Amino acid sequence: MKRTRVRWGRVAVLGLAVVLPFGARAVAAEGKGPAVAGSYVVRAGDTLWSIAAHLAGPGADPRPVVDQLEQANRGATVFPGETLRLP
């Protein structure tokens, strides 16, 4: 009987070791602000052009996306921590 309890204890510890990092990531992600689809939180060093180039994809022209971002938000100036609505 004791041997079975030891095994279940090891299984429980192993299960916690596997599940705990995922829970920690979920808790850490909650503090980063709203993660709503169709929005982007500006990070330090981001520009409207770099965000548009990322949204347009490789090889695509980002100029129409820049125009859409300007229209959907309050203009061409972005600040770190600001949440942009994506077109």
Image: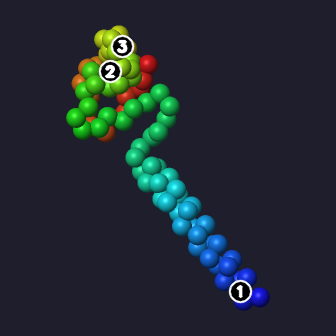
Q: Which residue is mark 2?
A: 53
**Disc with the residue nearer the chain's start (3 vs 2):** 2
**Disc with the residue nearer the chain's start (1 vs 3):** 1
**Disc with the residue nearer the chain's start (2 vs 1):** 1
Q: Can you name the residue that lies furthest to the bottom here?
A: 2
Q: Which residue is mark 3?
A: 60
Q: Which residue is mark 1?
A: 3
- Asked if labels 1 and 2 touch by Cβ distance under 8 angstroms, the answer is no
**Crowding near the residue tagged with mark 1, few <14, some 14–19, many ≥20 C-alpha atoms within 10 Å:** few
* Picture layout, residue 33 above or below residue 11: above
Q: Amino acid at mark 2?
A: Ala
- Please tell me whether mark 2 sits on a helix, a strand or a loop: helix
Q: Nearer the viewer, mark 3 or mark 2?
A: 3
Residue 53 location (% of width, % of height): 32, 21
Q: Nearer the viewer, mark 1 or mark 3?
A: 1
Residue 56 location (% of width, % of height): 38, 18
- Please tell me whether mark 1 sits on a helix, a strand or a loop: helix
- Please tell me whether mark 3 sits on a helix, a strand or a loop: loop
> Label 3 to label 2, Cα distance in Å?
8 Å
Residue at 63% from the left image edge and 72% from the top image edge: 12
Q: Nearer the viewer, residue 47 or 60?
A: 60
